[in-house]
């Protein structure tokens, strides 16, 4: 059980120490108020392939079993991992959860159901009863993701956003009973560390500071580009021009192959995946911006360079040096001219 004495031990055991240190002033008070009962958590899935659940189950810092046991989480409903079925499973939804997690986007009622209940109806019903916070997990639940991409025939939304605009299924003014907006953990899939550390923090009574897209700043306050192993080659203007040049020695930048690292906020280049082993660019694949609020529409067409040169030239001239910046500009501009394409706000392409 949580108390002042064992709090630090628990936080450390679940790998949340550094994260929670930032919020330590509030933590002890919250922990003292925590009851002996487990934190009731409901996990709903809308339009999703369960990829974020699979990602979470692979998490190791902490692993899901440790997190559940040490944090005394009472998972009342999770369609993928719960044993209960049928009416028994549906009865488990007749509660006021402490934490509601939503995975997958929220379409019109006929397109996604849990039993006979439309997911849209269930999310709204449970969200207003949620005592602490609603957490949207993955690109689809946060901003709509692939189901809400252009065309959007199921009229899908994120939980509190539609793409980069606040609103979504719950509306811009939604707050939990504790007065909190939806916490967004984007990604395709969401990173298990982001999910488990955020849930750990929430369960321990701390809501991390959010940015203007509802994301915890701790994970999303910097561009991937600034933490990339290939960044030195971007600064020098050394670009791969084909996928034959993307080997693991990181000796060329993947910008010209469509890398979205310069416009996407996340710590994935630093945190990496599979227990810190690798990340897209290190494996030779340009970032496709799966953490970006505009994914996938604003990231498309994939594998084509971003044409917004002025934004990209906001690189750090102090560290890059004037010559390197000029070389980068020449490399990018030459590519833009070769394609003969410009982009306007809204990302529509226009042939010259
Ligand atoms: S453009 Fe992509 S590959 Fe190149 S430095 Fe930036 S994030 Fe890394
Ligand atoms: S590097 Fe890009 S595509 Fe890869 S996980 Fe990070 S945001 Fe997603």
Image: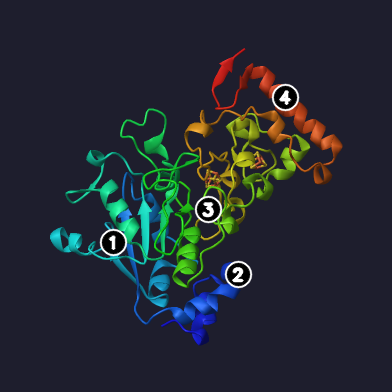
Q: Which mark is residue 81?
A: 1
Quarter of the image for residue 92 reads bottom left
Q: Earlier in the sequence, mark 3 or mark 4?
A: 3
- Nearer the observer, disc 2 or disc 1? 2
Vertical arrangement, residue 34 with respect to residue 159, above or below: below
Residue sitting farthest toward the bottom: 5
Marks 4 and 1, how far apart at CA:
50 Å
The answer to whether marks 3 and 4 mark residues whose Cβ atoms lie closer than 8 Å is no
Query: Looking at the image, which residue is at 66% across and 50% down?
Result: 227
Say which residue label 3 marks. 215
Instruction: Estimate the x, y position of residue 247 in percent, counting from the top left.
Output: 62, 41
> Where is mark 4, residue-wise?
333
Indicate which label's residue lies in the foreground, 2 or 4: 2
Depth check, front residue: 146 or 323 = 146
N-term mark: 2 or 4: 2
Placement of 142 over or under 81, stated as above or below:
above
Residue corresponding to mark 2: 18
Per the image, label 1 sits on a secondary structure element best described as loop
């Amino acid at each position: 059980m949580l108390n002042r004495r064992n709090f630090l031990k628990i936080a450390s055991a679940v790998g949340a120490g550094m994260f929670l240190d930032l919020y330590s002033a509030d933590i002890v008070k919250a922990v003292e108020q925590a009851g002996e009962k487990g934190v009731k958590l409901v996990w709903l899935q809308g339009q999703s392939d369960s990829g974020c659940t699979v990602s979470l189950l692979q998490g190791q810092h902490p692993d899901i079993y440790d997190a559940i046991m040490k944090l005394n989480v009472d998972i009342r409903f999770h369609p993928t991992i719960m044993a209960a079925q049928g009416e028994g499973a549906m009865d488990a939804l007749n509660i006021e959860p402490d934490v509601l997690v939503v995975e997958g986007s929220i379409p019109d009622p006929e397109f996604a159901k849990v039993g006979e209940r439309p997911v849209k109806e269930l999310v709204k019903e449970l969200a207003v009863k949620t005592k602490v916070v609603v957490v949207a997990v993955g690109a689809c639940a946060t901003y709509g993701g692939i189901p809400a991409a252009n065309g959007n025939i199921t009229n899908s939304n994120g939980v509190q956003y539609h793409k980069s605009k606040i609103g979504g299924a719950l509306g811009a003014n939604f707050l939990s009973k504790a007065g909190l907006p939806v916490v967004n953990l984007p990604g395709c899939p969401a990173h298990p560390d982001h999910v488990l550390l955020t849930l750990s923090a929430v369960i321990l009574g701390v809501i991390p500071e959010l940015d203007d897209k509802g994301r915890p700043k701790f994970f999303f306050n910097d561009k991937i580009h600034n933490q990339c192993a290939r960044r030195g080659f971007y600064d020098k203007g050394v670009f791969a021009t084909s996928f034959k040049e993307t080997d693991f020695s990181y000796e060329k930048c993947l910008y010209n192959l469509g890398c979205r690292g310069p416009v996407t906020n996340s710590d994935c280049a630093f945190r990496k995946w599979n227990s810190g082993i690798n990340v897209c660019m290190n494996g030779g694949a340009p970032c496709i911006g799966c953490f970006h609020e505009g994914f996938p529409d604003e990231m498309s067409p994939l594998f084509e360079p971003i044409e917004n040169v002025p934004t990209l030239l906001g690189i750090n001239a102090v560290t890059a040096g004037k010559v390197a910046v000029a070389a980068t500009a020449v490399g990018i501009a030459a590519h833009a001219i070769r394609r003969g394409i410009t982009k306007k706000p809204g990302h529509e392409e226009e042939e010259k």
